[in-house]
Amino acid sequence: MAIERADVLRQLDAGFADSPVVLSLGGTAREMLAVAGRKGNHLISLDAMGQTISLALGLALGLQETRPDEKVVVVEGDGSLIMGLSVMSTAGHLKPKNLAVFVLDNGVYLATGGQPTAAADIDMVAVAKACGWRDARDVRTSEELADAVSWAASAPGPVLIRVYIGTKQLQTNYFLEDPAILAEDFRRWLRSTRPAASVG
Amino acid sequence: MSIDAPAGVRAVDSQADLLERRSQAVIDGVESIDPDFVLHLASSTLKIVLDHFIAGAGVRVGRSVFAMPREEEGVAIASGLELAGSRPVMIFQDNGIGNLLTALLTLPQPYHLPLFGVVTRRGGLGEYNSMIHTVSERTEALLDAAGVRWFQLDARTPVDRWAVEIKRAWDFSRATHRPIFVLVNLMGG
Ligand SMILES: Cc1ncc(C[n+]2csc(CCOP(=O)(O)OP(=O)(O)O)c2C)c(N)n1
Ligand SMILES: [Mg+2]
């Protein structure tokens, strides 16, 4: 039986409660809000399809000196990943140790009505490895996901985890926050949790 | 005819001299920002500038210099770097402006993130490509339509002012919490 997105999001929120988590647009962000509420460590991308991993790559590069032991976690969709596929090469080349990407692959552009993506024909694990990522794996069950969450927290990045999910959606409200506030909330969280050694 | 010569001085500048002088001014300007990340997408007009940062005197400990495969990817990476408190500078060619508009208008512009780019002009006087003007010539119009603030450095600004103006544009991006591009004409005109 397929795992559903809301369950994956619950596990990712719990597994990375104190790490920066960058959330892809649409249902991914809205369902995370539904299952976890507003979290200081969650940076929500409201519309920049294709750019979630790139945004997180910048964060990871910028934080790797001051917060080397903490992963920047990305929750990306298959459609958005494919739109910005070039970042696979950049991340594989730069190899930030603190980047972990979870691709929630439902095989469709779910937010816009379920049109099929090309994901079914892509071996994302092979793509990541071929681009120079340190490691990658497929996840199909809850147990594999639990394993992958603790693995991603400690394995040197960049790592990619492709999670095969179903297409069930939670009923959610629209999320209408001002993006400038989202950025500032996230920066505040970063400042409030900056490791003591790097203050100053 | 001399370009960039002090008033009253008549000298003969080759396009190569001009490129070298203006490139050095761009290097000085970007160095005065002291960026810790330089993201670039190559242009033949940027060779001198990029050589400086990739393999020349601009190489330093604590500075990371890398190619962005697409300008929009660079915008998103730079946005993440800005959120992390870094000092990224993007350097690329104006025919890539179309590539980055959606990313620019869905990340740094609405999220109020400063972002800074030096953009080399193509398609004007001295151009050797018979087609590139069809996109490059629309740069200002595209940025204006998108509501993105830009400044131009060309023969109208003495080259010895360029570095200062580049630093002021960087400061302006911080002061106004938004993307700022400096368009630099390294080819003449
Ligand atoms: C540039 C751009 N084109 C189209 C859209 C419309 N859009 C919003 S969400 C979405 C689907 C994203 O697919 P995926 O990443 O697989 O996430 P899912 O909806 O399946 O969770 C699309 C096409 C957009 N936001 N931006
Ligand atoms: Mg999808």
Image: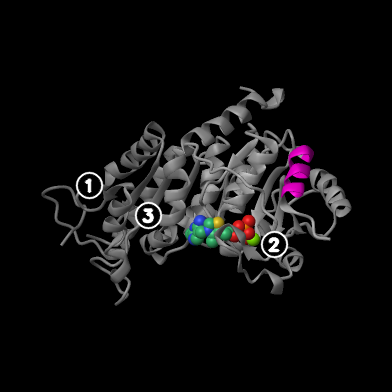
**Front-most of B8 and A157?**
A157
Q: How would you rate the neighbour count of disc 1 (Cα within 10 Å): few for under 14, some for 14-19, many for 20 or more? A: few
Chain bearing mark 3: B
* Magenta segment: A6-15
Given this view, does label 1 or label 3 mark the residue nearer the observer?
A: 3
Residue indicated by mark 3: B119
Q: Which mark is residue B157?
A: 1
Q: Which mark is residue B178?
A: none
Determine whether the beta carbon of the residue marked 3 sits less than 8 angstroms from the nearest atom of ligand 1.
no
Residue located 17% across and 48% down the image: B6
Separation of disc 1 and disc 3 at Cα? 16 Å
Which callout, 1 or 3, points at the residue further toward the start of the chain? 3
Instruction: Residue A78 in the image: state x and y as whole percent.
Output: 65, 61
Instruction: Residue B169 in the image: state x and y as whole percent.
Output: 35, 40
Quarter of the image with the N terminus of chain B is bottom left
Q: Say if B9 sits above or below B177 in the image.
A: below
Separation of disc 1 and disc 2 at Cα? 54 Å
Furthest residue in direction left, as rendered: B8
Residue indicated by mark 2: A106
Secondary element at tag 2: loop
Task: Please state which amino acid type lies under the numbered disc 1.
Answer: Thr
Residue located 41% across and 60% down the image: B46
**Front-most of B138 and A120?**
A120
Q: Are marks 3 and 2 in contact (CB under 8 Å)?
A: no
Task: Please state which amino acid type lies under the numbered disc 2.
Answer: Asn
Chain bearing mark 1: B
Secondary element at tag 1: loop
Determine whether the beta carbon of the residue marked 2 sits less than 8 angstroms from the nearest atom of ligand 2.
yes
Marks 3/2 same chain: no
Q: Is residue A181 magenta?
A: no
